Amino acid sequence: MAEHDVDRMLKRWTGAGVIDAETAARIRTFELANAGSHRLRWPIWLALGFGATALAAGVLLLVSAHWDDISPASRFGLVLSLVALFHVVSAFIAEGFPAMAATLHTVGTMALGAGIYLAGQIFNLDEHWPSALMLWAFGAAAAWGLLKSWPQMVLAAILAPAWLLAEWFVAIQEHQWVLVAAQIAACGSALLALAYFTAADRESIAHKALNRLGAVVLPFTLAGLALVGRESYRSATDTLPGNLGIVGWTAAIGLPLAVAYLLRGRESWQIAIAALWMFVLVNVRWLAGETAMYAWWAVGATAIAAWGVKDARSERINMGAAMFGVTVLAFYFSQVMDKLGRSASLMGLGLVFLAGGWAIERVRRQLVLQARGGAA
């Protein structure tokens, strides 16, 4: 804990009469004497991350190099032992080096996925392949429930949606060219990434981990949403049979809303608004034209930035500014540039980058300052 944080809390507690001045002095001495002793700096975390990756890669290479020389029974025993080894070693070092234990537990859960697929290969199983992802996701969720470790939670948060997407792709494999099927997958992925990105609790490590996961995944899911939103055709075959479309849209909207409610409680209504925005987005081009589609993207970018100001979260403001800038560039390339000459289009592009970038950055800084309580 930083020195100014200790002083601020002690001043507040002393002023409220919770502790006296002598107790506050003892607490301050203790905290400063132990400051940083239980916190890992970024080089150590970086070393642990690279070490875990190298260890997992080395084990996989070692096994794959001798895979053909091992009998099926030995293969299965090796797979089980590798999964168990990391967790057992982690249990022994958990008290002395918790961070290393958490890292090895994570490698063990990752090895579980490899073990599931290798077991299927050993016994020549040709079943419903998304079931392997389901078992892996359940294993990560069980590890999260037992260990209360945020890396296990992140693995579960990645594997569970991957399983559901795999189930969806299998369900629509006979209708894979139906546009609605792609729209459902894109909307569900983007909405769930947004729910992760807007996790509200600043003090919880789990919420911070989900927030960063969402920040990484959200731009890619928005790109997928943009691709399916650009398709303007509609045909008689552009429907899903039976109740498949109802089930798909219910899962794509309902599951992210449930996750958002668990993370934000009653404030999850913003995710419902985002779901409505996405549903309109994938249909607005063929209803109102391409210019309306870009305008709707600008509305979404502005809404995310305003959401960041409301909750005092600068990362949402930055995301909204980035979305707005990309929308302007995409509009220029698709609607303006081809209507100008070569020199005029290049000069216009330069003006878009210079003037537009300056304006967006200025507004972004003002919004971040406003969100932090300063004067705009």
Image (tube, rainbow, N blue to C red):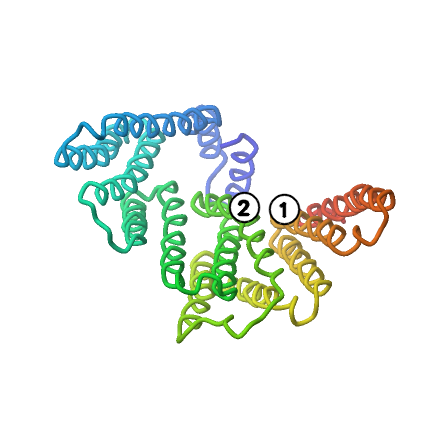
Residue at the extreme left of the image, as rendered: 73
Q: Is residue 93 left or right of residue 299?
A: left
Image position of 79 (left or right of 290): left
Is disc 2 surrounded by few (<14), some (14 to 19) or many (20+) residues within 10 Å? Answer: some
The residue under label 2 is 215
In the rendered structure, which disc, 2 or 1, sits on the residue that comes first in sequence?
Answer: 2
In the picture, residue 31 is in which quadrant?
top left
| Image coords of residue 61 (percent x, y) | 31, 27
- Per the model, the C-alpha gap separating discs 2 and 1 is 12 Å
Q: Which-is-in-front pick, marks 2 and 1?
A: 2
Which residue is pictured at 39% across the width and 64% down the height?
A: 174
Considering depth in this image, is 235 or 355 the residue closer to the camera?
Answer: 235
Which residue appears at 17% of the width and 29% of the height?
70
**Is residue 357 toward the left or the right of residue 221 in the image?**
right
Few, some or many residues within 10 Å of mark 1 (<14, 14–19, 20+): many
Task: In the rendered view, tell whether residue 91 sits above or below residue 360.
Answer: above
Quickly name the residue at label 1.
314
Label placed on residue 258: none
Of residue 3 and residue 143, the one placed in the foreground of this image is 143
Residue 68, horizontal then vertical, whole percent: 21, 30
Give percent across and percent down for residue 121. Answer: 23, 42
* Three-letter residue code for mark 2: Ala
Give the SS element for disc 2: helix
Residue kind at label 1, given as amino acid type: Ser
x, y percentage for residue 275? 54, 65
Query: Which residue is more in the foreground, 127 or 325?
Result: 127
Q: Is residue 363 left or right of residue 115?
A: right
- As helix, strand or loop, the secondary structure at mark 1 comes to helix
